Image: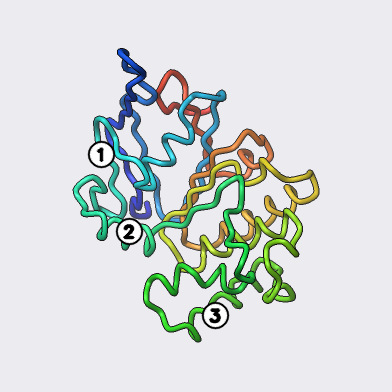
Amino acid sequence: MSEVVLRCQSLGRTYSDGDRSVEVLSGVELALHAGEKIAVIGASGSGKSTLLNLLGGLDMPSTGQVLLCGEDLALLRERQLCQLRNRRLGFVYQFHHLLPEFDAQENVAMPLLIGGLPRRDSLRRAAEMLARVGLEHRLVHRPGQLSGGERQRVAIARALVTEPDVVLMDEPTGNLDPQSSAQVLALIDELGKLQSAFVVVTHDPAIAAHMNRTLELREGRLEPGS
């Protein structure tokens, strides 16, 4: 069995709503192994995005802990947390969140530049990753010059350029037409051969079917999908 790269134990998240508390997650357990692909499904409002934010260190749990490559995210200082996220995590959202003033190659190179890699090396690695996602002919195009499917592939290339241990995806095809969704699904299949592990929140049964296993959020808990 490969090593566990992401683990959460007794994970819970409660929010305050006026005078009352709203428990979104309670006692969530998860062990994600290197190279494994997991789909997380659930009804709207079940806490899927909250779970991703906790797994990625963008929010902190009310109870329990998240361990990324053995590091307890809640015990890290902000600078340490940012460095760990930059090195170990990749994020892909429903909306691409590309920087409009930079071209595709520069957008993909951004995590490497933030991590301190020289610009020349960062751009070279970005070009290599864009070629892997079939966009070697779009290096100097800005997001506004790309189709929706192309923008999402650039976002996926950006998430993977640091060769992260874990990639978190939040509805990666939720804003795409059927043809672009199929292209992204094929890309996830291809990239699944990498050592990165994937946690993919999705309503798309086609994506869930391509994962190693499917988990469902029900009443704040993560259970095997039906």
Which mark, by number, is residue 82? 2
Q: From what the image shows, is residue 212 above or below residue 225?
A: below
Q: Position of residue 124 (x, y in %)?
A: 55, 82
Q: Nearer the viewer, residue 206 or 146?
A: 146
Q: CA distance from mark 3 to mark 2?
A: 22 Å
The earlier-in-sequence mark between 2 and 1 is 1
**Amino acid type, residue under disc 1 in the picture:** Gln
> Regarding mark 2 in the picture, which secondary structure is present there?
helix
Measuring 32% from the left and 60% from the top, which residue is drawn there? 84
Which circle, 1 or 3, is nearer the viewer? 3
Compared across the picture, whether 90 is left or right of 21 comes to right
Q: CA distance from mark 1 to mark 3?
A: 36 Å
Which mark, by number, is residue 65? 1
Compared across the picture, whether 87 is left or right of 42 comes to left
Q: Position of residue 19 (x, y in %)?
A: 30, 13
Classify residue 133 by image quadrant. bottom right
Q: CA distance from mark 2 to mark 1?
A: 17 Å
**Amino acid type, residue under disc 2 in the picture:** Cys
The earlier-in-sequence mark between 3 and 2 is 2
Q: From what the image shows, is residue 99 above or below residue 1?
A: below
Q: Position of residue 222 (x, y in %)?
A: 42, 28
Badge 3: residue crowd in 10 Å (few <14, some 14–19, many ≥20) = many
Measuring 59% from the left and 37% from the top, which residue is drawn there? 202
Badge 2: residue crowd in 10 Å (few <14, some 14–19, many ≥20) = some
